[in-house]
Each structure stands twice: as C-alpha cells, then as structure tokens.
C-alpha cells in the first residue's frame, strides 16, 4: 500500500493538461495502484494522476457501495453526455476543507484505455458520471470550482486559504 501526497492548490501541475499515455505498462499499473490506495485513504470517489503530481492522463473511479470496484482509465474522453443534469457537492484533496455544488450531465459515455490496454467505451450514470467528469476535468487542467461563477470561485479559494493558514 503506497499513499501518495496530493499536491496543494495552486501547484502549476493542476492547471496543465496531462500528457496522453502511450500504452499500459507495469509502471502505469503501479501508478494506478498507488492512486487507488490514496483514493481509499482519503476517502474519495476518484483520483486523477495530476492530483498526485503525475502529469499523465490516468484516472481511477470507485463509487460502489462496497468499494473495491475501481475503474482504471488511461486517456479518458467523454463521447456523449446526457442533456439531463445532476447536482452534486464536489471537493478535492488538492484544496481541502471546502466544497461546492456543481451541476454536470447525469450520464456520460466515456472512451478510455482499460487496464488490459484495450479501448473501452463505458456508460456512467449518477455519482459515477459525476466522478468521471471531475477526473477528466483534472486531466485537462481544470478544477471543479472552475464551474462556479468568478465571485463564488474567489470566495471558495479564499476560504480554503484561510483554513490552510489556520492550521
């Protein structure tokens, strides 16, 4: 079990688009394993490699009730998003202590390289869809609070900074 440190906001790696993964190797599988361990320790529903300072398009998501059902994704991309929206309170270990309700498509179809190195198209609904979209945002250099108005975003970041200084 290897826990990785989540890089703190505003580390530049969180704003840079991650690099595509050429193929699934033992090194990629090791990063995924560390990401799952880190996600479970938080606990959280997903983690993108950039969150632990690895600038590769890798993500893991596990929204199952029992856990242990993590989907490992390389180079995920949304092929289709439903018109029906869903609101969910989102947060990030990169900006601890704050969260915001974000509105995203309720369902998405995502194409990615799976752990066997095969291209897979998979439908995600509800919390799974929210988490997958959240991770794909991270891989594009976006944070969940980028979906907020400028004023709400500024207030959220200021609150997180105040919490950080109080520690």
Image (tube, grey):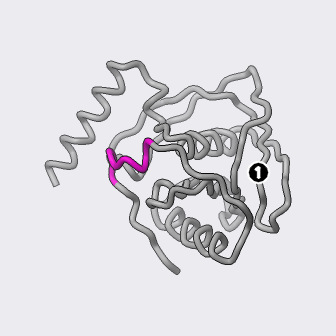
On the picture, is 117 further left or further right than 98?
right
Q: Position of residue 40 (x, y in %)?
A: 53, 65
On the picture, is 40 further left or further right than 14?
right
Q: Secondary structure at mark 1?
A: strand
Compared with 98, 66 (above or below) is below
Image quadrant where one finds the C terminus: bottom left
| Magenta stretch in the rendered image | 8-15
Question: Is residue 89 shown in magenta?
Answer: no
Residue 88 figure quarter: top right
Q: How many marks?
A: 1
On the picture, is 75 further left or further right than 30?
right
Residue that appears at 33% across and 53% down: 8
Q: Position of residue 46 (x, y in %)?
A: 58, 54
Question: Is residue 10 shown in magenta?
Answer: yes
Q: Position of residue 18 (x, y in %)?
A: 55, 49
* Mark 1 neighbour class, 10 Å CA radius: few under 14, some 14 to 19, many 20 or more: many
Q: Position of residue 2 (x, y in %)?
A: 49, 78
Q: Which residue is mark 1?
A: 112
């Amino acid at each position: 079990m290897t826990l990785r440190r989540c890089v703190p906001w505003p580390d530049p790696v969180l704003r840079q688009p991650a690099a595509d993964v050429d193929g699934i190797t033992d090194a990629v599988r090791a990063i995924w394993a560390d990401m799952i361990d880190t996600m479970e320790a938080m606990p959280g529903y997903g983690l993108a490699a950039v969150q632990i300072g690895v600038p590769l398009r890798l993500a893991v998501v596990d929204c199952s009730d029992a856990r242990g059902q993590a989907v490992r994704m390389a180079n995920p991309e949304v092929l289709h998003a439903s018109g029906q929206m869903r609101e969910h309170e989102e947060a990030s270990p990169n900006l601890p202590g704050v969260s915001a309700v974000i509105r995203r498509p309720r369902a998405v179809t995502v194409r990615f390289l799976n752990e066997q190195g095969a291209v897979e198209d998979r439908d995600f609904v509800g919390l799974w869809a929210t988490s997958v979209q959240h991770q794909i945002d991270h891989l594009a250099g976006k944070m969940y609070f980028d979906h907020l108005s400028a004023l709400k975003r500024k207030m959220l970041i200021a609150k997180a900074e105040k919490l950080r200084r109080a520690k």
